Image (cartoon, helix red, strand yellow):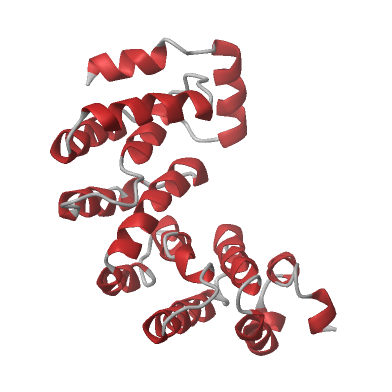
């Protein structure tokens, strides 16, 4: 693992690291390495490592608690086709309790999106997240399921999954946490580009109970239809 971590550290920028620490407001080491650099590094690593080696490296990088280490860990596992992917999903799932900031959580959720799209039966596990005491785990249930907002011509099974996740979003509406409200709005806003009817129905039923900023963002692309 040290070999790969040193490759990240070779691009460290102390000034940028200080700015990132102030921006993210989470107490952990920051190296100041830009995302495009991490993208290039992890792309090369994916080509050189088999699945089990990638899982092992991702686990080690995540456990460093270094901001860029966690982002690189998630990027290592963000790929549509991974076979077999059971160990990848299990590792991603194991990271949930560690989520404490949006950047690392969102990168991990992007990897989760690929694995959920590959095996939608995993939504049964995700549904358990929706009742967690851990806000970031509850939030992950919506961020990790964003692929179901993007289908223009979903099959009946995917429409059912879309409605299922909308049900989770509805159950979140009374939660006043900003990140939860933001996640609801994000899901609805993205869905509105492909399924305006469902978003309009959701907002007519639940919009008044959402925080104003979340309601506005959810209806960003539906202003004419909501008036």
Residue 66: quarter of image: top left
Residue 135 location (% of width, % of height):
44, 59
Residue 222 location (% of width, % of height):
76, 75
Answer above or below: position of 12 versus 160: above
Residue 175 location (% of width, % of height):
55, 71
Total labels drawn: 0
Answer above or below: position of 210 versus 19: below
The structure residue drawn at horizontal position 61% and vertical position 71%, both measured from the top left corner, is 188
Q: Nearer the viewer, residue 119 or 189?
A: 119
Residue 51: quarter of image: top left
- Residue 28 in view: no
The structure residue drawn at horizontal position 36% and vertical position 56%, both measured from the top left corner, is 114
Answer above or below: position of 89 versus 202: above
Residue extending farthest to the front is: 153
Residue 93: quarter of image: bottom left
Left or right, 144 with reference to 213: left
Q: Nearer the viewer, residue 129 or 177?
A: 129
Left or right, 13 with reference to 216: left
Residue 172 location (% of width, % of height):
51, 74
Q: Quadrant of the N terminus?
A: top left
The structure residue drawn at horizontal position 33% and vertical position 35%, both measured from the top left corner, is 73
Q: Nearer the viewer, residue 92 or 63?
A: 92
Q: Quadrant of the C terminus?
A: bottom right
Left or right, 62 with reference to 49: right
Answer above or below: position of 37 versus 9: below
- Residue 34 in view: yes
């Amino acid at each position: 693992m040290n070999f790969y971590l040193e490759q990240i550290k070779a691009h460290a920028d102390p000034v940028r690291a200080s700015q990132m620490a102030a921006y993210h407001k989470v107490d952990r080491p920051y190296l100041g390495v830009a995302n495009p650099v991490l993208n290039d590094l992890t792309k090369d690593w994916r080509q050189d490592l088999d699945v089990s080696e990638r899982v092992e490296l991702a686990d080690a990088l995540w456990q460093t608690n270094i901001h860029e280490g966690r982002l690189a860990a998630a990027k290592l596992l963000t790929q549509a086709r991974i076979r077999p992917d059971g160990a990848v999903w299990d590792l991603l799932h194991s990271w949930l309790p560690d989520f404490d900031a949006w950047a690392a959580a969102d990168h991990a959720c992007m990897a989760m999106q690929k694995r959920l799209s590959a095996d939608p039966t995993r939504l049964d596990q995700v549904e358990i997240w929706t009742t967690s005491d851990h806000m970031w785990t509850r939030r992950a249930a919506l961020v990790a399921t964003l692929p179901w907002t993007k289908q223009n011509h979903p099959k009946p099974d995917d429409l059912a999954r879309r409605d299922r996740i909308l049900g989770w979003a509805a159950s979140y509406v009374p939660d006043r946490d900003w990140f939860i409200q933001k996640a609801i709005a994000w899901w609805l806003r993205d869905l509105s580009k492909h399924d305006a009817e469902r978003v309009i129905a959701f907002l007519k039923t639940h919009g008044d109970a959402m925080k104003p900023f979340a309601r506005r963002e959810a209806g960003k692309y539906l202003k004419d239809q909501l008036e």
